[in-house]
Amino acid sequence: MKKLSVFSIILLVIYSCEKDNPKTENDYSNYISSDAISYGINFYPLENYESYNSVDTPDLKLHFYSTKFYMSGIHYLVCSKFIVNNELIIRFDSIQSNDFGFLEPTTAEAYIDLPESINRLTLINGHTIDKYEILISKEKVEIDSIVKNYTNVLYDKIFRYPENTFNFTCWTDTIEKNICTEYLNILFNEFSLVEYEFSGEGRVPYPYYTSTSPDHYAAVFKYENVSDFDRAGELLEAYTLEHIPPNQGQSISLIGWNNKQFHSYTFY
């Protein structure tokens, strides 16, 4: 239920920005508003999915959130979105909230679609304008600042999900570490797999990839055929039922680039 609530909130803030296409020159005078957000805004590019459990091609977005934390309710950024040629213009209009109650502090958020054709990003808050350059390729998204006043990009380089790859994650204890290598050997004997390496600087999209926990192992693998990943899930189920006892702090997860997932703890 907790995961469902979190992704319901994400769906709510995704639609908090309205799209328009005014016929104006890029002097930004027609975008200026007397309304303004009083606090700074952090943001970064990412790829995510329409819903938590959907199997689909990931969508490229910008995630914005306020530097201010709110102690009650769900808050989201209300903004207006404009596209002029290859420039994405976002105006932050206000912060709104609903009556959902959360005990932990939360920020005001918005998720905004980032079209592949965009190479300039302009962020308007009242009369203040921040500007960025964006380079989007099939493998990566890079953002460079031109003018910064109230915004901050947290991850200026991110890798995108490579097609036909999956994140292998294995949690085990200090006594029984061989389940990771045993299951991987089964996969390598069954079909062709190569470990995928992200080249250069950038944030890796897969979860757990950079964990340094001593009881955790993670890697990304690339497969040849779509059916290979389904077969990996079948082999994980068989291996789990024979070698991984429930409730012992050991598990294996496979998370695909298209959000198809297999987890050993779901097979009992």
Image (spheres, grey):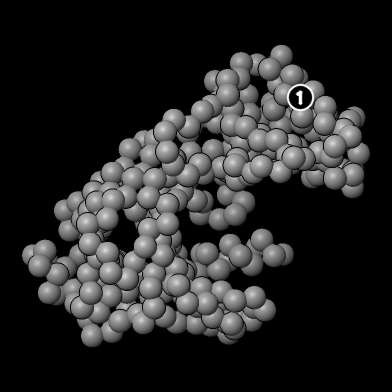
Q: Could you tell me residue 198's position as x and y percent? A: 48, 32
Callout 1 amino acid: Thr
User: 229 left or right of 137?
Assistant: right
Give the labeled residue for mark 1. Answer: 181
Position of 30 relative to 136 (above/below): below
Q: Secondary structure at mark 1?
A: helix
User: 233 left or right of 267?
Assistant: left
Q: Nearer the viewer, residue 90 or 151?
A: 151
Residue 267 appears in the picture as rendered:
no
Of the 4 image quadrants, the one containing the N terminus is bottom right
Q: Residues within 10 Å of mark 1 (few under 14, many from 20)?
A: few
Q: Which residue is located at x 89 percent, y 47 percent?
A: 247
Position of 175 relative to 133 (above/below): above
Q: Which residue is located at x 41 percent, y 74 percent?
A: 77
* Quarter of the figure with residue 237: top right
Position of 40 relative to 113 (above/below): below
Q: Which residue is located at x 54 percent, y 80 percent?
A: 70
Q: Which residue is located at x 72 percent, y 24 percent?
A: 184
